[in-house]
Amino acid sequence: MRGRRVLMESFVSHGVRHIFGNPGTTETPLLDSLPAYPQLEYVMALHEGVAVSAASFYAQASGRPTVANVHVAPGLGNAIGSIYGAFKANSPVVVTAGQQDTRLRLNGPVLGHDLVAMAAPVTKWSVQIERADEIAPILRRAFKVATDAPQGPVFVSLPINVLEQETSVEAAVPDRLWRAAAPDPKGVAELASALLKSQSPVVVTGDDVARSGATDALVALVEAIGAPVWFEGLRHHASFPTGHPNYRASLPGDAAQVRKAFEGADLVLLLGGPFFEDIWFTEGGHIPRGAALIQVEVSPERLALNHRLDAGLVGELAASLAALTAAVRAGASAEFKAAAQRRNGTLAETRAREKEAYKARLEKAWNREPPSMPRVTAELRRGLPDDVVIVDESITASLDLARAFDYRGFGDYFGGRGGGIGQGLAGAIGVKVAMPDRPVVAVSGDGSAMYSIQALWTAAHHKLAIVFVVLANREYRILKHNVDVWRQNFQPGTQHPYQQMDLAGPALDFVHLAAGMGVEAVRVEKADDIAPALAKAVAANRPYLVEIAIEGKR
């Protein structure tokens, strides 16, 4: 059989249902094989970065590995930023690229380059298939490595001539692996003992809690110990219900501010994440002096990587948290239970005060024109259904968006990891493909939207009912905020206007951009019109863009 048949049957064998890609000449063997494999749907993008981000978010939303296919060296170069985002998000994506005929290797063919070297820094494994006999074993290993914890993208280079070679090595049957580790009882006892000694514990949760289906187990533990819950600063999921009284917020971007958030804590519990991803350098560590630090991870790689631990545990997160909760409850004295309940009560009071403060902020900003961020996000909530899935790249509006919406757990919220912009519109493609029965709304800043505006065409081409909300303030507002922080941190002595951070002259027109790609769109400039426009967009049940004028930096 030919190598391309082995390739396609390897995809099918490993449960792949979609290939997200942008076609090219060296991908002809794959593309020409598609009619013979109707169980594989090709989701076409107009840019490799869109294809990879869509695949990454699909893998997150579906819980399954998938494939992104890009085109030789320039195409892989276009995709690198999105592969980096998938790497930081721990998305199990097998990224493939058609490579030039290996018989041209020494001649420097057009579009040729060392693809393996290009992809290696942003993948878990990068490899080129050199002969057809390697296709099945390399694809088997690629899916294994991509789904090993912590998950992440791998890269496979596919020379066009190798896919046309004959081979007798058939596609491999997937490995039947049970990789979720049971927590060590001694470790559980040690962590439980530390929690029982604590008088002011704090929990920080990463994305792995949501991916592991451990949110309910985390709620039970948090309520048993009376602890506040913080999210990582950049997150892909809501691992804890944001309407719960013990929920706090996402952590800030430097160690000093993180320490301030943990002020008064005598113990910090880290769960399932790469703690901590700072934006700015500040002196000192993240953990308050004298506080104990304990951690639970699904694999040893992250455990004690960045911080010395008082106790660390490797184990499947739902099982580990359930075991911890059981051990805490079994060992808790009457005094501990009473103290935990008092802490829960205090957190509920704090949350109630914060809601009142936010309500006052909202009322103060209610009538500003152009509409304020708090008003816009409140109107988004009013205009969208309760079962909406939010794909968030709102950047500077994200704090207000988080206050306006209550995310119950996995599937309600998807954000981008890594800090690179342009993931939101593209990511919504993958989320909708994975979750076709729920309304999906992508909320993006206008600057971010222009990084992957081609995603609108893909939504129209595949008839994906996504509502794209573009918050148009005609600026890179986050960069202006960062300039303010930079001036405070480094005292450069400059106070001139922000440089190259305004998106005006000409102003971007998203209504016409959307129309040019087959997507109906409307621009909203009055706050009272936002909720009705969104309700209409969702009811249309087709790709729809709502551009909302929003205030700039004051």
Image (spheres, grey):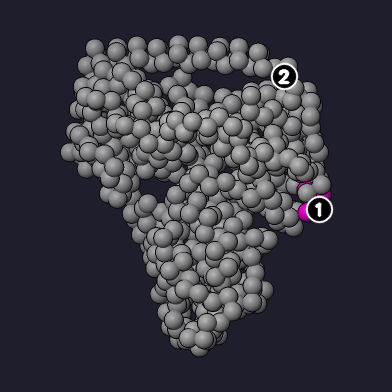
- Crowding around mark 1 (Cα neighbors within 10 Å: few <14, some 14 to 19, many 20+) is few
Q: In the displayed structure, would residue 164 be above or below residue 153? A: below
Q: Which amino acid does label 1 sit on?
A: Gly
Upstream in sequence: badge 1 or badge 2: 2
Q: What is the count of numbered marks?
A: 2
- Whether residue 239 is visible: no
**Residues shaded magenta:** 514-519
* Residue 133: quadrant of the picture: bottom left
Magenta segment, principal secondary structure?
A: loop
- Depth order, front residue of 171/472: 472
Disc ID at residue 368 = 2
Residue at 17%, 38% (x, y): give it.
186
Task: Tell whether 217 sits left or right of 23.
Answer: left
Residue placed farthest to the front in the image?
Answer: 493
Task: Give the quadrant of the C terminus.
Answer: top right
List x then y, in percent, for residue 419. 50, 44
Neighbor class of circle 2 (other Cα within 10 Å; few <14, some 14-19, many 20+) is some
Residue 127 visible in image:
yes
Q: Nearer the viewer, mark 1 or mark 2?
A: 2
Name the quadrant containing residue 296. top left
Query: Where's residue 154, x and y in %?
Result: 44, 63
Q: Residue 516 carries which label?
A: 1
In the image, residue 64 lies at what x, y percent?
50, 55
> Would you say residue 412 sits in the magenta stretch?
no
Q: What element carries label 1?
A: loop
Left or right relative to 260: residue 311: left
Amino acid identity at mark 2: Arg
Residue 517 lies in the magenta stretch: yes
Residue at left offset 56%, top offset 72%: 72
Q: Which residue is drawn at 21% across and 22% down?
A: 197
